[in-house]
Image: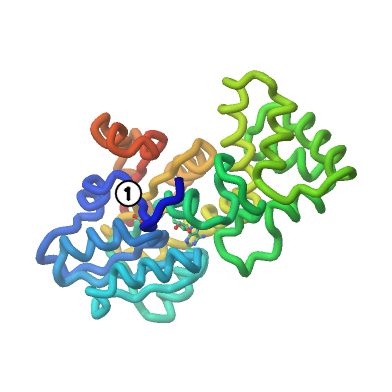
Amino acid sequence: METKTPYHEPVLLKEVLKWLKVEEKNRKVYLDATVGLGGHSLAILENSDTSFLYGFEWNEDSYELALKRLEKYKERIKLYNQNFIFAKEILQQEKVLVDGILLDLGLSSFLLEGSKRGFSYQKDEPLDMRINLELNLTAKDLLHRSSYEELVTIFKKGEVPKAESLAKKIVEKRKKKNFETTFDLVTLIKELYPSPKRINQILPIVFQSLRIEVNKELENLKKALEDLPEILKPGGRLVVISFHSLEDRLVKEFFKRDGRLKVLTKKPIVPDLTEIKHNPRSRSAKMRVGERI
Ligand SMILES: C[S@@+](CC[C@H](N)C(=O)[O-])C[C@H]1O[C@@H](n2cnc3c(N)ncnc32)[C@H](O)[C@@H]1O
C-alpha cells in the first residue's frame, strides 16, 4: 500500500534527547546531520525553547517536507539540502561550534516506501536508489556498467553471500535484457537462491549493498566521523544511530581510536521492546555517543 502522508517514526527519540542533553531552558546549538522528515529535529526544538538547530538533509523531497514541518521554528533553524560531508566546512564558515550532533543514518520510511526511487525490493520501481538526484550513477547504471570484478567487490563489501555467483549471473543476464526495475533484480536473485527463507535474508542485503555503493554511504560516514568532532564544543556530544553492522563497526572502531572523543556508551544503546513493538523498523538500531574532550 502507498503511504499517503509521508512519515517516519524517529528512532530512540527519548534517548537522543537525553544524550544530547536537550532541556527546556538551554541555549544550545545543535546539528541534525540527517534531518529526514524532521522527527528528531522537531523534538529538539520543542524541548529546548532557546536552542538553535542547523540541519542537513541530502534528499530533495525530504528536505522540502522537513522545511514545512519545522516552519513554526523558522527563527531557530537553518536547514541545508546538502550532503553532511559539507557540514564542517559550512558551520566553520558560519563560525559556529555546536553542543550536540545527531547522525541518524540510513533511510527513512518515507524514502523506502514513498520516494519511488527503488530502495525497496517489495515495490516494483525504477532501479535508481540515489538519495540525491545530482549523483551520477543509478543502481541500474551500476548493474550495467560495472565489470564482473567490480560487482563482486560491491557485493563483498556489502557482505552478500555468494557474491561471485550473483555477479556472474548479473553479467550473463544483462547481455540478454536490461535491468530496468527492482523486480528485474528480485527475479534474478530468486533464481539464484531458491529457498524462500534464504531469499528473504538475501534480498535486503543485496539491495542495501547497491544502495550503499550508489550513495557512497560508508565513505560519507567516514568523512563525517573525521570532521564532526572539529565543530563540537568541549563537552559537546556526537550521537550516532546506525542500522547495520557495516556502519556500526565503523562507528565503534572510530570512537575507540579517535583521541578527540571520550566514549560514553561502552555498549551501544538499543531500542526497548516497547519501541520495537511499536516501530519494528527500529529493531536493528544501535546508538553510540562520544563526548568532545
Ligand atoms: C533515518 S533517516 C533520518 C530520520 C530523521 N531523524 C527523522 O526523525 O525524520 C536518514 C536521513 O538521512 C538522509 N541522508 C543519508 N545520507 C545523507 C548524507 N550523506 N547527508 C545528508 N543526509 C543524508 C536520508 O536522506 C534520510 O532522510
Quarter containing the N terminus: top left
Residue for point 36% across, 35% down: 280
Q: Residues within 10 Å of mark 1 (few under 14, many from 20)?
A: some
Q: Nearer the viewer, residue 206 or 3?
A: 3
Q: Position of residue 20 (x, y in %)?
A: 25, 54
Residue for point 24% across, 45% down: 15
* Disc 1: which residue: 9
- Which quadrant of the figure shows ligand 1? bottom left
Identify the secondary structure beneath mark 1.
loop
Q: In the drawing, does residue 223 fall left or right of residue 15?
A: right
Quarter containing the C terminus: bottom left
Residue 76 higher or lower than 15, as above or below: below
Residue 249 higher or lower than 98, as above or below: above
Q: Which colour style is shown?
A: rainbow
Q: Residue extending furthest right?
A: 175
Residue 105 visible to the viewer: no
Q: Nearer the viewer, residue 282 or 252?
A: 282
Query: Looking at numbered disc 1 in the image, what kind of residue is underneath it?
Result: Glu
